[in-house]
Amino acid sequence: MGSKNIMLKNYNKVTNKDSEKYIEAKLAREIKKAKGLCIKLLPLMFTGLPDRLILLPGGVIHFIETKSLGDSPRKRQLFVHRQLASLGFIVLIIDSNQKLNDFLKKI
C-alpha cells in the first residue's frame, strides 16, 4: 500500500474535526485540489516555524500553524511568526475546522 493510501486512510479515521491532525490533513487535501502545494515544514535547524508552507498559483505564499481547538502556539512559535510577518509574509493560526473553512473560501 502506498503512502498516499495510508494518508487518506488516516484522514478518514480522524473523527474530531477540530483536532490538529484533522485540520492539517484537510488543509493538505484542499490545497492540492486548488492546484497548490502544502509543504510540511520540519524545523531541524530552525525551531518555531509554522507547520505548513502553502504555495498557491500566482505566487501566493502563506505560512500556516495548525493547532487543535483551544491550543495556543508556544512563545518561540509566536516569535518566529512575528519575524515572518515583519518580512511581509502571511502567517495564520488555524485551530478549528471553521477557521480552516474560512481560509479555504478566501484562496
Image (cartoon, rainbow, N blue to C red):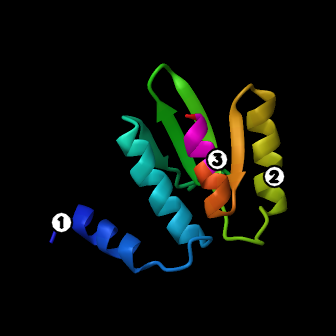
Per the model, the C-alpha gap separating discs 3 and 2 is 22 Å
Q: Is residue 39 left or right of residue 75?
A: left
The span picked out in magenta is 102-106
Q: Secondary structure at mark 1?
A: loop
Q: Mark 2 or mark 1, which has the lower sequence index?
A: 1
What's the residue type where badge 3 is placed? Asp
* Left or right: 65 as drawn, with respect to 107: right
Instruction: Please determine whether, in this image, residue 6 is positioned above or below residue 50.
Output: below
Q: Amino acid at mark 2?
A: Leu
As drawn, the label of residue 2 is 1
Q: In this rendering, which labeled residue sits more in front, label 1 or label 3?
A: 3
Q: Quadrant of the N terminus?
A: bottom left
* Quadrant holding the C terminus: top right
Q: Secondary structure at mark 3?
A: helix
- Image location (x, y in percent) of residue 40: 48, 52
For residue 4, what is the image quadrant? bottom left
Marks 1 and 3, how far apart at CA: 31 Å
51 lies above or below 54:
below
Name the residue carrying label 2: 78
Which residue position holds label 3?
Answer: 102
